[in-house]
Structure formats: structure tokens, C-alpha cells
Amino acid sequence: MSHTAENPETFAMPNDRVPREWSRKGTSVSLRGLRRQFGSTLALSDLSLDISPGELVVMLGPSGCGKTTALRALAGLEPLDAGSIFLDNRDISKRAAHKREMGMVFQAYSLFPNMTAAQNVAYGLKLRGVPTKTIETRVSEMLDLVRLPTHSDRYANELSGGQQQRVALARALAISPKVLLLDEPLSALDAKVRVELREEIRRIQLEFGITTLFVTHDQDEALAIADRIAVLNNGAIEQIGTPAQVYSSPVNSFVAQFVGSVNVFTEIIDSNNAVVVLGQRLNLDRWSVGSIGSKVRLMVRPESISVKATEDGNVTISAVGFMGSSLNITAITQAGDVVRSNVSWHGGSDLRPGMSAKAEIVGPILFAESLSS
Amino acid sequence: MASIVASETELVGKPSIKFGESEKMFGLGRRFRFIVLTLTIVFFLIPVLASVRYSLLGNHNSLTLSAYGAIFTDPEFISSVLVSVKIAVGTVAITILLVTPTVVWVRLKRPDLVTVLETISLLPMIVPAVVVTLGVLTAFASLPNIIMGSPVILALEYVVLALPYTFRSIDSGAGSIDIKTLVEASKSLGSTWLSTMVRVILPNLRSAITSAIFLSTAFVFGEFAVASLMSFTTFPVWLVQVGSARADESVALSVVALLLTWGALTLISIIGFQRQKRTGIRRSSTFSVSIITKE
């Protein structure tokens, strides 16, 4: 069910990542045809995914898309109706959760309230009968790793949300798991801590070279830390690829609209296999989306549209949102369509609501699809 | 004592203050609260003080501890307390072993059944005790005589009758922690079911279970009707017997029983509070404790 991006037209991304050679320390994970049904809802529909050793794959999708079910199935916390899970080519589908050797970080409130931070981290090691001296060393190593060396005696309720998740991460890693599973670990935190912690997670993940599956509904999070992103919808993977591939070459309109924001234009193809958008003729040769006279839907990223103030423009600016480093411009065309643009702060500092402006498509068409069946 | 706290909470919870007159009304509210609180304290303390005085009264208004001496040297006292202790131990053991896993399982696997369980747990309060007693007797009629003829059957009765208090106590403790996530976190770290229960769930339910233990014990040491009906001389039954023959000893006994209960409740509050201070595990039973002391 998974697709790789085939779209050759990818516009240059400053943070484009080429998949690196994965650390050989890690374990490979393979999900094969996972299927899980809750009543009449199909949570997982023949989902297959391969994760290379040491790779960080983010499962991204709207709520109810099956991403958490997939992660829980991998952890052994959710039974499967069909499908197999392989770890280093060994089938572990029937193995109980406590024997799967996976470290898991939950959304929130997963620290044992009756134990201190150090006792939480030591928990998995104690269960494995590790000698007390070794446990002590390991616990202090782990708390150092998550930058909480002085918090070992604190109980969960004496730690902030971010600190609790750091301890949860230390606890998950202490047992040297084969795979690290992160189930929306940052969603309960405030914006600043979320960004800090996701960078920490990535740093630690790279340091350990541990195969990681990270589940989130936050596209910024996914784009920022993933080696590859698997975009899920209705229990199946719509697309899997590097953040740059998923962002700039979506394979369908769901991925295009879910990852990042888009402008959607519905136009009719003219005799030269082109459409006219914002007064510009755009060639559709690269997109096989129908014949002359048929309707086509085009998607264009806000950053691919420039807006410049001018007397006789094609749009009227209706709102200017200050985003810090950039501006989100909302404009209305003469036909009444809404156009959204993202311009640099310097480039758009003279734009004010009510002004006439010229909107122009300066980047590629992100995705085009035929509307006539 | 607990009733006083309840009254105070109720007044704080429903202030009769109108907007615009808050300052004036607030002063009046405070005075009103003080009066009600004083009246309540007087209402509860007078009988206690009167009992203490009466139990200490000797001939010609002299003070004496003879009533207390008499009860502690009475062989019936020891044997009735012993019977009640045995029943209490049995009731506590069965309750904890039955209710704790049930609550954990339901909260974990069938959270939709929590309300159903809550309703069932309240039935002994709605159904008359005699009906429950007969029901339990009928249900266990086939058990051998060693159970039916011994205080064990009374323990079985009390497990059911004390359920409204014990279930609520354990269930509210379980409701205050995220059992599902804790169990899953424990399993993912390599723990078995048993180990998870012992190392994670039970320690986090400790104060709730302690409350349930105290509540069951208090119930056993306070229940008269069923024990008398089934012809067992438990502590409360003996208390009534003594009361009909020797009034001063009966009152002295009531005072002792009252002090013991208060002592136990204070202990549970201290233990719970100290624990709560650091771990933040919510103590679950203040409300349930207030119910039993009203009984």
C-alpha cells in the first residue's frame, strides 16, 4: 500500500535530507499487512511498513487514522486481526508485550507516581535482575542523558510536564530496547518545551542509533525530526518518504493538504493543456489530469505565491498575519476566491489589509488532479 | 467529627451571597457559619462529654475508673472482641482480594461498566440488611457447616454489607490514577501482570486500600442487627447485652469504642496526608470515612 514519491519536480528545500546510512547497531522493523477492526471501524487496513536499523520514522496523520493503533500493535499492547511484525526478520507477532524489548514513551502521565525519577528509570532494570551497583550507574547515566541529573529524588508530581517526559524517555532507554516507540510524547506540552524536547529526542536517538517509531498529528514535529515520514489515513499509508519528498512531492491530494497548507484552485483545461490561475498560464504537461475542457484541481503552497503591493493588482489583501520571521497574507481575487501566501517579513512589510496587490505563482504546482471522473 | 467537616464544606460550597452586597453579606455569612459550626460542635460533643462523665461517676458523685476496670476484666469482653477481630480480618481479606482486582480489571478493560459496578455496590444501602442477610445465607446454604456455623458466614455477610464503603474507597483511588497507561508502561518495561499489580498498582492504591481496611473494620465493630439476628456474640452484640444489665459499663465501653474509632481515623488521615504531600497520590476516602462515622 505504500507509495514512494515519483514526482520528479521537487523544488529545492534548504533542509532536504538524503537518507543516511543507518547505524548498524539498530534493529530492523517490518510491519506486514497489519489489520485491526474496532466494531465497524477499520483502524488498520493492510498496513505495511519497513524501518531500517537506526532510522527514525514518524507516523503522521489525523486523529483516528490508525497511527497509534499501529504503534501499540508493534508494542504488543494491541492485538491484531491479521498481519505480522518482524524484528530483524524474526516474527514477534505472537510475543507478549513484556517480552518485546521495546521502550515506549506515552502521551503523558505514565511515570509511576509512587516512585521517584530514579526509581522509575531503575524499574525495567530491576525486573531484569541487574545488580544494584550497575542499576545505580545506569540510572545516573540516563538522567544525565536527559539533562536531569539533579532530579533523581523527585516524584512525578514534583516534575514539570517536560521533565516528566524526559524521565519517561530515560526510563524507556534504560533497558537498552531494540526499538523506541514514542506515542505523541510532546502533545501535552507547551510550544516552547515541545520544540526543545523534540530536538533532545532526535539528539538522543542519533546518539543511540536506535530504531524509532514516532507517532504524531503535528506536521511541524514530523518534518523537523523524521528521517522518513509515513502519512496515514483511514488505517493505511498514503505516502512514505523523506520530509522533503512528502512536503514537496505529495502523491495525492490528502497528503498535499495534510502536510503543510495549500491553496486550492479549480480550473478548466484549455486547448494548450494549460490552465489560467491568477492571470498566469500554467502548463499541465507534467500532470496527466484530463483532456481539454475538463475540470482540474490544482494545489499550490502559500510560499509559492508572491504578493506585492501595486495599484492595479489582481487581488485585495484582507488580512496580514505576523508570524515572526514571515507574514501570512490572505487576499481575495476579483472572482472572490481566497489566496493565501507566505512571504518573508522584509518582502511584505509594506502590505496592509485593504490594499490592492499582485499575486503571482512563483513556485511549482504541488499537486494536480482531475475532477471529472 | 467528620460530620462537622461535612457541614462546614457544605456551607462553603453554597455561599448565599448576592452580587453587589458581597462585603456586607460575606461578614454575615461568616458569622452565620461560625454559629452553625458552634452549634454542631456542641450538638456532637455534649453526648460524648456526658457519656465520659457518666462512665467516670462513682458513688456520691465521686470519680472512679471502676466501670472501665470492670469491662476490661470481663471474660466476655475479650471473647467478643476476639470474635469481632476474626470477622474483621476475614471481611477485610475477602473484600481486598475481591474488590481490588475487580476494580482494576473493570477500569482497565471495561471502563463502561464502572457505573454499573457503582450502582451494584450501593445496593446493600438500598436493600434492607435483613434481606441481604437472608440472600447471602441462601446463596451459601450449600457450604459445609464449618462455614455456615462459624463467624466465617458473618464475614461473608459483612463483605456484601460494607461494599458501599469499601468499593467507593478503592474505586475512587483507582479513578485518580491512569491505570491503563501505568499498566502498559509497566508491561512495556518487561513486567508481568503479577509484578505490575504488586509493584505499580497496589502501591498507588495503598491509601485507598488502607481506607477500605479501616472502613470494613469500623463496620464490623459497629454492626449489631445482622450479628444479633444470626446469634453471634460480637463486640456490638455484647455491648448491647451489657447495656441492658450494667449501664455504667456500657457507657464506658461506648467511650472506649468511640476513642478507638477516632484514633483510627486520625491515623488514616495522617498516613494519607503525609503520603499525598510527596507523591501527590490523591487520598480517596475522606468522604467515605464521613459516611461510616455517621452510622
Image: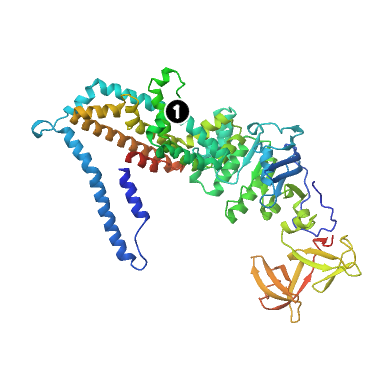
Task: Say which residue appears at 70% left-offset and 42% top-offset.
Answer: A37
- Residue occupied by mark 1: B94
Position of A300 relative to A129 (above/below): below
Residue A120 vs B228, above or below: the answer is: below
Q: Is residue A15 above or below residue A340?
A: above
Subunit ID for the residue under disc 1: B
Callout count: 1
- Left or right: where A281 falls relative to A221: right
For badge 1, the amino acid type reads Ile
Q: Is residue A246 visible?
A: yes
> Looking at the picture, does residue B215 appear above or below residue B23?
above
What residue appears at the point 40 percent right and 39 percent down from the top-left corner? B125
Q: Residue at x 34, y 60 (%)?
A: B16
Question: In the rendered image, which quarter is residue A176 located in?
Answer: top right
Closest to the observer, B39 or A251? B39
Most foreground residue, B163 or A277: B163
Q: Quadrant of the C terminus of chain B?
A: top left
Where is residue B105 drawn, in percent x and y? 55, 35
Q: What scheme was used to colour the molecule?
A: rainbow
Across and down, in percent, residue A24 comes to 75, 37
Residue A58 screen position, x and y as percent: 70, 48
Q: Residue at x 26, y 24 (%)?
A: B77
Q: Residue B65's image quarter?
A: top left
Image-quadrant location for residue B193? top right
* Residue A159 x/y as whole percent: 51, 46
A87 lies left or right of B184: right
| Residue A147 appears in the picture as rendered | no
Q: Residue furthest bottom?
A: A311
